[in-house]
Image: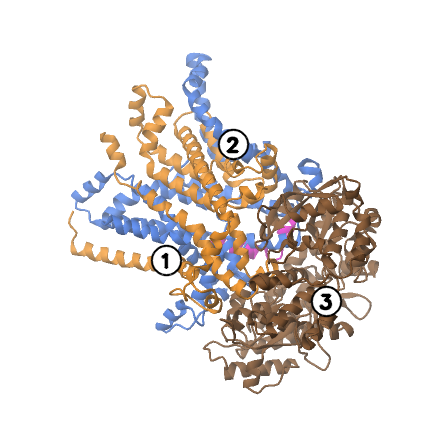
Chain colours: A blue, B orange, C brown
Amino acid sequence: MRVYYSDVEIFEPLSEQTFPLTARLQLNIEVNGMNGLTRIWKREWPLHFMLIPGLFLVLLFSYVPMAGIIMAFQKYVPNKGLFGSPFIGMKNFQLLIDYPDIGRIFFNTMFIAVMKIAAGLFVPITIAILLNELRREWIKRTFQTLVYLPHFMSWVLLSGILVDILSPSSGIFNQVLGWFGVKPIFFLGSNDWFPYVMVASDVWKEFGFGTIVYLAALTSINPSLYEAAAMDGAGRIKQTFYVTLPGMMPIIVLMLTLNIGNVLNAGFEQIFNLYSPPVYESADIIDTFVYRMGVQQAQFGFATAVGLLKSIVSFLFVSLSYVLAYRLANYRIF
Amino acid sequence: MKNGPADRITLLAINLMLLALVIVTLYPILHVIFASFSSPAEIVSHRGLLWKPLGFSLEAYKLVFADPRIYIGYRNTLFIVVVGVALNLLMTALGAYVLSRKNVMWNKFFMIMVTFTMFFSGGLVPLYLVVKGVGLTNTLWSTILPFAISTFNLIVMRTSFQSIPDSLEESAKIDGANHLVILFRIVIPLSLPVLAVMGLYYAVEKWNGWFYASIFIQQQELFPLQIYLREILILSSTDSLSSGAAVGEQFQIGATIKYATIMVATVPILCVYPFIQRFFVKGVMIGALKG
Amino acid sequence: MKLGRKFLLITTLIVSVALAACGNNAKETEKSSPSASPSASAGSSASSGAESGEVIEVSTVSQSDPYLKFDEGESWEKNSIYDAYEKDIGVKITNKWIADVTQFKEKVKITIASDDLPDFLMVNATQLKELTEADMIMDLTELYEQYATDETKKFLTMDGGLQMKTATFDGKLMGIPSSYNPYQYQNLYVRTDWLKELNLPEPKTMADLVAVSEAFKAKNPGGKSTTYGLAVSKNPFSIETGVTGLRAFLNGYHAYENIWIDDGNGGLVNSDIQPEVKQALAALQDMFKKGLIDPEFAVKDTEKAAELLYDDGIGMVFGATWTPAQLVKGAVKDGKIVQEWGVFPIPSVDGNPARPQIGIGVDEYYVISKKAKHPEGVIKLLNQWIVVDNHPTEDQKVYGYGKDRVEKGSNYWLLNPLRVGKQLDNNGEILPKAIETKDASILQTQDQKNRYERAMKFVDGDTSMWWEYLISGPKGAFSYGPEIQKNKQYMQNKFYGAPTPTMVDRQEILTKKRDEVYFKIMMNQVSVDEFDKFVEEWKKLGGDEITKEVNEWYSANK
């Protein structure tokens, strides 16, 4: 655990906020002697007390197992355990770095993931705003209930349906394109199309579910703001830009920052069910690669190493976006 | 507020676009519904999309419900969802409340500590060893306690708690309310929409979860519904000639059982959302302020 | 290599499922049991434990199966089969956990990684090696020598001892092979009603195959809008693809998918990079260009690809011996036979007959934990299984069917915790003859009796048994076996060691590159000459290293 502790310290915001605390303590001590600490404690202990159960569970089920991360540097031998297995240095990482297609795989992963993050933000927000414009409550509710259904279908099932829909010979999508004189396209078999099909079909499956949190956020916008805007003569479109969007901004920035952590998660289940050798070039991602490696070797070391690498990358990205959100937009999400 | 003609056109356009979206997103579930009621023999040789049930047969549903383990599964899943989500919400709300207070000692540190778990995890084997070590294996709690707090949900809830005006809280404090009272009487009622969303997220996750149950639970009587259903799905998988070797008619039924199973597994959780929507009412905050 | 194992399961499962399907008239399945003397003698040494009244306990883990239907009041914890083992040989079986097929593998991994082994369990070849290296499992050499009966020893070396060899490390027996018969050959299945309608000859050469598929497509006897010549699905080269694969197609060109074959100089070479493959790929590309292969095959799994077969769109497919059990879904509708299929040996590109490729016949092993208190109990389970599975007395039918000893399609045999299959069978010699002459007297094994009975039902007009006749009947899928067997006209993988170190690290990329280039050639996206570039790349990416390791193994194990 100590290992990560030092990681925490390089997390920039920490140094920033430990400062005020120490300053505050210092101040208290200077003013009130050691009593300051006692006073803070006296005031804050109920809060800390409320945190104990959750903290305990997090420590037990998240931090204790983190010891497993050392597997990434080991040739793990089950009966020797985590602390008895031989260390092999960076060999597990070396295997990943030496992999001939590694650059391609990282590119594919990020390319698909970033597009998914962007689309997964844009579409639900747009839909939420459009829904907000509807006056009839029942339409709004029915719509919302219907579009969130695909979220509950597995990719195994959806991929079967998608293959039918996108079939160049008989698929309805290509038929519709045909009306406009477009020649049939083999979307799932073409490297030019595959990544975009993944993004589009991911939106298809998830946008309804994604809309929910924004709809909830919309309810907290003070209606009097709309009234005031209307009095000032703002139309609906103007209201959207000057009232709705700013009102949703905190949640939008929050979601964006948190989702950036998925920059290396391009969606294993979806791609695994839809890709094929002709599109490996554009479709093979880290997770599918680790899966195929797992078939060859039963060792946990390699998978742990890749997992650790992914964690570090997403941690860095989220830290970066946190700092950017704070510096550029002055949003402090946590 | 009256709508001008421009507004009306915009509204029409929005409605049409939403209608198109509904059609596109509705198809998968329709496909499942149609297929689950179809005659197995016809489904097998059918190609392409389904626009209506092919023939009509309830055979698949009869077979799914004939398995007594379905009911055991429902019972276990219900327990996991109800107890699990209650615990999730309580823990998340407590955590989010504390961490949303300003100027509390060590809060930033705890916040970072919790956030950290969103990225780094030790993997399955160490988690299994811990769960086993504390004696939770082979209990339903093994699917509840280790996942009591989702960092993502915690952060979202915290953000929402932070947006509640300090003034409300201050006035309560002056009235002598302690933190628990503030949390349950002021903060939570004002954050119902977000709380409802978090509840939905947790419920869906618990409802669909099977992986950890399959790893942590040994006894079949404790398996959640999804594990049984996955087993039934094997009946119809391409692999079934190897694992189960259904032949001919048996196999044909397998094709529709798959869909009936999906229906049985999905419909109950689908019904949750309309209830959640009740909480999405505008102006809750205003009402509270006035009252 | 899973295929063979699957077959073992399938043959047995088909029996019970089909019996369940045809309902009540199943009770006459068992006839007189063969001579009880061997079982009695074999049983005597094993049952000593029970006689002395001492019951030993062994723990294991089990795989549940949706087709296993428990009798009233029975469960994994308590059932008539476990009771029978306890009563007959004094071994009490307990399960540390039970999981279905999909989760079983994952759970075994966790079980191993957390050093939480039961007394015995089934693992794959890679895990066997790992467990051996980690010193977590027992050396069974002496134990087996002491406790295995002569019958068991004979049973597990029917293939000349090859399968046992795969479980032996440095002269130590580390596991008991979960054996099956590897001599199962793929065939070509063709719509014979279409052949007749179009007046076409049986396909004997690869040229015939192309001619027939061209005719099927052009003349379209099925009258469907979408027609192709040969059914192919998304993993055509994988062993997992039992129907709609292309391994047999390669074999027709004397090419083979990822096995190790003689290089002519006493060494081994990998079949994936041999020039014959290029020829086969060129032929596939040609068929693709002519529209004889579904251009979307790369995204269709077996079930989706097979829709075209059921729907009269395609009339030709390669597949394992059990393919008819898949075809029946489209061939028999509402009790009527609507499609007629024939079975043919794999056509050859030239005068030399095609040699179907086969594996060793084992990919999983039963291993005993080092911590097991009563390892002998496991060997007793093995002895008993071989007895009761091959020549059960009336009493021992409990082990197959449960306490009422009547087949009712409940697949009770799945409850036996340790199962091994025959490494050889003579179904191909016996069954077609017996069915043709309606002579039940020459049948030898229970499996043969069951199959015969089903085939007879079909002869008597029960169309739901159509598939069995096509598997076991004259000119059925089994019937070509003996000829191939006699002439040794098969190609068996010459490498049966555990994966070499470079294989562990590099096999994935080699398979990936191979699939990429094979598919692209097939789909006419690149020229067939890309194959030569692939061969060079294969060697550089670790193939040469693997070849070296395999040959080192070969010279040590010849």
Q: On the picture, is A318 further left or further right than C235?
A: left
Question: Disc 2 vs disc 1: Cβ atoms closer than 8 Å?
Answer: no
Mark 1: which secondary structure? helix
Disc 1 target residue: B26
- Asked whether the residues under marks 2 and 1 belong to the same chain, the reply is no
Residues at marks 3 and 1 touching, judged by CB atoms closer than 8 Å: no
Report, in whole angstroms, how far the alpha carbon at label 2 lies from the one at label 1: 40 Å
Could you tell me how far apart the alpha carbons at marks 2 and 3 are, in whole angstroms?
A: 55 Å
Mark 2 or 3, closer to the camera: 3
Residue type at numbered disc 3: Tyr
Q: Overall secondary structure of the magenta stretch?
A: helix
In this picture, residue C239 sits left or right of residue A62: right
- Categorize mark 1 by other alpha carbons within 10 Å: few (<14), some (14-19), many (20+): some
Q: Which residues are magenta?
A: A94-112
The secondary element bearing badge 2 is classed as helix
Label annotation for residue C183: 3
Q: Return the residue at label 2.
A: A57
Residue drawn at x 34%, y 26% is: B182
Q: Can you say whether A205 is above or below B134 in the image?
A: below
State left or right for residue C319 relative to residue A313.
Answer: right
Q: Is residue A101 magenta?
A: yes
Residue B221 is situated, as x and y percent measured from the top left of the image, at 55, 42
**Quadrant of the snapshot with the C terminus of chain B:** top left
Q: Chain of mark 3?
A: C
Number of other residues with Cα within 10 Å of mark 3, as a class: few under 14, some 14 to 19, many 20 or more: many
Q: Residue furthest bottom?
A: C199
Tag in front: 3 or 1: 3
* Residue C197 image position (x, y, % from top left): 54, 85
For the residue labelled by badge 3, is the local secondary structure a helix, a strand or a loop? loop
| Residue B25, x across and y down, in percent | 37, 57
Circle 2: residue type: Leu
